[in-house]
Image (spheres, helix red, strand yellow):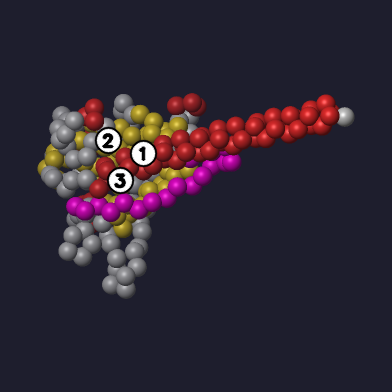
């Protein structure tokens, strides 16, 4: 009888230990994924917040460069996305690369001083994946608050038409997780853009 009770207690303790270990592993996995997502958001924020209106060669002219579309954004930045680039100005592009194991949210950079000018840059060369398996990337752009204080968002930003950088960019995408895709959305102010007085 005593042996049977001891076996039941040992079985209960072993099951509790297995549950605790599995819970710790899940917690560590969630923490790692949250840290990766924070790092990606910081890359977007650092690049967009340092968008630069400095005139560079675009086509036959010299002008500021910002190409904001619903699924991709390309612009001049003083905040390179990695220490490997060092300081200075860079063209940067964020987009969604589709297909197979190499798919996800991607970033590409290039020198702004190109023979064909910045306008000839497609923004997909030598890209690296920021979020493997990331999808549903979407950008929207705002000129800043309207008179009544509301922010209006547009799926594209034409620098020639608007005459300046956007005041803010909203970024949305989904990241894979064991429980299914998780939507992430955040707004990045662009100090060199402008609301009133920007």
Q: Are marks 2 and 1 in contact (CB under 8 Å)?
A: no
| Residue 187 point in image, percent of width and height | 35, 53
Q: Which residue is drawn at the image coordinates 65% and 35% (left, top)?
A: 19
Q: Earlier in the sequence, mark 1 or mark 3?
A: 1
Residue 45 numbered mark, or none: 3
* SS at badge 1: helix
Q: Quadrant of residue 21?
A: top right
Q: Which residue is mark 1?
A: 39
* SS at badge 3: helix
> Most extreme residue toward the right, as rendered?
1
Q: Quadrant of residue 89?
A: top left
Q: In the displayed structure, does residue 188 sit left or right of residue 177?
A: left
- Work out whether residue 25 or residue 158 is closer to the camera in this orientation and state it: 25
Query: Is 178 colored magenta in this rendering?
Result: yes
Any part of residue 67 in sight: no
Query: Is 179 colored magenta in this rendering?
Result: yes
Q: Which residue is mark 2?
A: 81
Q: Residues within 10 Å of mark 1 (few under 14, many from 20)?
A: few
Q: Which residue is drawn at the image coordinates 59% and 41% (left, top)?
A: 179
Mark whose residue sits in front, 2 or 1: 1
- Work out whether residue 193 or residue 125 is closer to the camera in this orientation and state it: 193
Q: Are marks 3 and 2 in contact (CB under 8 Å)?
A: no
Please give the range of residues in magenta: 175-192
Residue 146 numbered mark, or none: none
Q: Quadrant of residue 60?
A: top left
Q: Earlier in the sequence, mark 2 or mark 1?
A: 1
| Residue 36 point in image, percent of width and height | 41, 36
| Residue 136 point in image, percent of width and height | 47, 43
């Amino acid at each position: 009888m005593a042996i049977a009770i001891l076996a039941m207690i040992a079985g209960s303790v072993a099951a509790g230990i297995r549950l605790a270990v599995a819970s710790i592993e899940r917690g560590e996995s969630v923490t790692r994924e949250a840290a990766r997502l924070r790092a990606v958001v910081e890359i977007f924020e650092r690049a967009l917040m340092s968008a630069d209106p400095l005139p560079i060669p675009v086509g036959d002219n010299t002008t500021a460069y910002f190409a904001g579309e619903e699924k991709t954004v390309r612009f001049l930045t003083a905040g390179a996305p990695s220490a490997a680039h060092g300081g200075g100005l860079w063209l940067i592009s964020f987009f969604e690369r589709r297909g197979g194991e190499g798919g996800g949210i991607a970033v590409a950079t290039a020198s702004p001083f190109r023979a064909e000018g910045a306008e000839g840059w497609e923004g997909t060369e030598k890209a690296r994946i920021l979020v493997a398996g990331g999808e549903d990337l979407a950008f929207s752009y705002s000129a800043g608050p309207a008179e009544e204080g509301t922010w209006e968002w547009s799926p594209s930003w034409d620098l020639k038409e608007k005459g300046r950088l956007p005041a803010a960019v909203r970024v949305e995408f989904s990241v894979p997780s064991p429980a299914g895709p998780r939507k992430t959305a955040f707004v990045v102010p662009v100090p060199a853009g402008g609301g009133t007085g920007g």
